[in-house]
Amino acid sequence: EARDFIDWVMHLNFAMLERSIKIIYELGRFDIIHAHDWVVAYAARALKYSFSIPLLSTIHATEYGRNGGIHNDIQKYISSVEWWLTYESWKVIVNSKFMKNEVKTIFQLPEDKICVIPNGVDINKFKGIEKDYNYRRNFAADNEKIVFFVGRLVNEKGVQILLDAIPKIIANYKNVKFVIAGKGPQMDYLCGKAASLNISSNVHFTGYISDEDLNRLYKCADIAVFPSLYEPFGIVALEGMIAK
């Protein structure tokens, strides 16, 4: 049993390495190894050298960026593994020019090693989905506006900043409800913060939400808000734009 997160990551890499080797022997050699983020760095590097297969890595965020710097030993360790993965990679894929500049600066990567492949959304995702007023009434009355957030409940997504703004908003516009969809380690903290601000009656935390309900909420919402402190590429913002 893993003693902590880092220990769990190592167990994961051993399991992935074992499974990958079995697949290679069963199906034959592969052309590319793709590692998404530092969590799989150990398995990816072992496969690269064991089978002489080129390694690509995708970095969608950095430990430095998520935390606004490196502040403790665990963050330092994760950042060093991120650097190590990018060093071992033939090419590093990022999802925006912002992330290109970040990995180039933090990891001292050469320009020609970084490839920008922007994220995208299906522009027809909400086609045929109508505004469901009965579903909307689970969160707000017909005369109330819905301000909607969806994302993982972690510090860098900035939900705490949204909560701080709500008392000022409802002081000037009372017919409004805030729907916060998603789960994460800050759920209890954010619920407690809403209670301490006396705004619990205006804020609905949905927790995990299915794709079907998420699409319905997008269509029901009047405003989608994303108060991120760190956002390499906001897919949910694009989805908010097309869910009109």
Image (tube, rainbow, N blue to C red):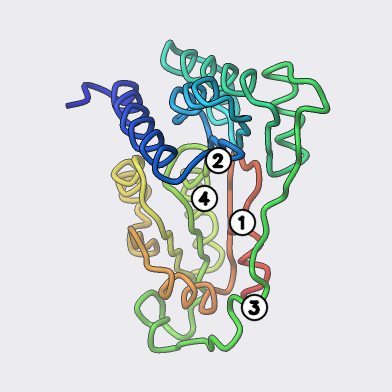
Residue plotted at (59% across, 30% down): 53
Secondary structure of the residue carrying tag 2 is loop
Residue farthest right in this picture: 112
Closer to the chain start, of discs 3 and 1, is 3
* Marks 3,1: beta carbons within 8 A: no
**Does residue 134 lie above or below 18 as drawn?**
below
Residue 30's label in the rendered image is 2
Residue plotted at (48% across, 58% down): 150
Q: In the depicted view, which residue is nearer to us: 152 or 43? A: 43
Q: Amino acid at mark 1?
A: Ile
Disc 2 to disc 3, how far (Cα)?
34 Å
**Does residue 177 lie above or below 232 as drawn?**
below
Closer to the chain start, of discs 2 and 4, is 2
**Does residue 31 lie above or below 12 as drawn?**
below
Q: How many marks?
A: 4
> Which residue is denoted by mark 1 in the rendering?
235
> Which residue is denoted by mark 4 in the rendering?
162
Residue plotted at (44% across, 38% down): 24
